[in-house]
Image (cartoon, rainbow, N blue to C red):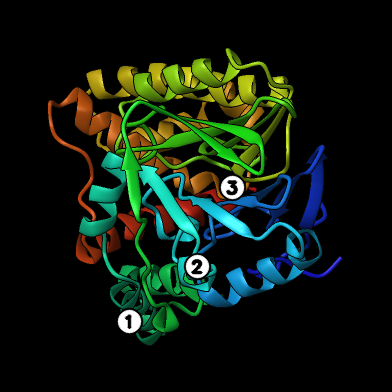
Amino acid sequence: MPPTLHGAAPHYPGGLHQVGDGVFAWLQPNGDWGEANAGLVVGAGASAVIDTLWDQRLAREMLGAMATHLAGAPIDLAVNTHSDGDHWWGNAELPAATEIVTSTPSFAAMLAESSPAELGRLGAMGRRVAPVPGPVGAMGRYVGSMLAPFALGDVQLRLPSRTFSGTSRETVGGRALELTVVGPAHTPGDLVVHVPDAGVVFAADILFVDCTPVMWVGPVEGWIAALDTILGLDADTFVPGHGPVTDRAGVQAVRDYWEWLRAIIAREHAAGRSPLDAARAAVRDDSFTPFRGWVRPERMLISVTTIHKALSGEGPIGHSPVTRGRLFADVAKLGRELEAAR
């Protein structure tokens, strides 16, 4: 198997995989930064795509792999599951006639998020300062490496053409797709896509499998409720936003993670510890064992910060490159500490 986008050995095969009758998952191992998944539902004479990855080069590769299935069933509908760029910045590669739908809060967040150019500049800045000794260089190496595989400077944004609130039942090529807004959780407007006739759910970033999830907005109780909603659907196959395709036990494992993190960070917050020190305590605790092997455990700090801010009565993490750059300095520090402890 070829290496991942970040050059690691893949833990599972990437590419296009059939997960149901006329339903396919596009997987980018191993669920590291930007290694996002997408989906395809093929109906009679029309298809739907779920998410379009982080840049147009990756989107072209994905659509090329789908070409055989799309030959008699062009893409009528695309669903953007949430506002993070690694799930929709490839939209410009979709056919001009494709209708793109997302949730109303996700659309608002898309307008407020940093642009591809801004994020590209953050990556370039990171690579420039990478040789600098100390925490500045460490942050630069982390962010520069995180963004290096992606051609963000070449992205031409194409926003969704329609939004909805609550639920929306879409019909594509005679097949039903049930869209349900389950956010705010990972982002302000996360949605999931249920394909009832195939028993498949595209859970997007409500579900990270064998890799550490990231909670930018929360609350954590909202994420747990979102997972309960997914578990309540008539489905046995779940395509995560990052990581391999899973079953109901895989969904439950993510739920267990959030219950664990919520409890341990509440304890550390009550003790007056900072988010970084709270995360350090969490990873040292024996109860972290089931999650220790997940990809990018240092990403926990982002979620810890979100939970910590909520417990302090503050709003979510800001989305400017400066704010996130400062946070990533601590994420990089935690990553180095975890690596040294192995």
Q: In the rendering, which numbered label is found on residue 341? A: 3
Q: Residue at x 68, y 73 (%)?
A: 61
Q: Residue at x 24, y 55 (%)?
A: 319
Query: Residue 142 at x, y = what percent?
Result: 45, 67
Instruction: Choose between 311 and 54: the one closer to the eye.
Output: 54
Q: Please identify, in this view, whether the residue under mark 1 or under mark 2 is nearer the observer.
A: 2
State whether residue 244 is above or below residue 310: below
Q: CA distance from mark 1 to mark 2?
A: 23 Å
Q: In this rendering, would 315 be left or right of 156?
A: left
Q: Please identify, in this view, whether the residue under mark 3 or under mark 1 is nearer the observer.
A: 1
Query: Residue 151 at x, y = what percent?
Result: 49, 80
Q: Which residue is mark 2?
A: 90
Q: Residues within 10 Å of mark 1 (few under 14, many from 20)?
A: some
State whether residue 113 is above or below residue 242: below
What amino acid type should be assigned to the residue bearing mark 1?
Answer: Met
Q: CA distance from mark 3 to mark 2?
A: 38 Å
Query: Residue 131 at x, y = what percent?
Result: 41, 85
Q: In this rendering, would 179 be left or right of 245?
A: left
What amino acid type should be assigned to the residue bearing mark 2?
Answer: Gly
Q: In the rendering, which numbered label is found on residue 125? A: 1
Q: CA distance from mark 3 to mark 1?
A: 29 Å
Q: Quadrant of the N terminus?
A: bottom right
Instruction: Choose between 197 and 140: the one closer to the eye.
Output: 197
What amino acid type should be assigned to the residue bearing mark 3?
Answer: Ala
Q: Residue at x 15, y 26 (%)?
A: 312
Earlier residue among tags 1 and 2: 2
Q: Residues within 10 Å of mark 3 (few under 14, many from 20)?
A: few
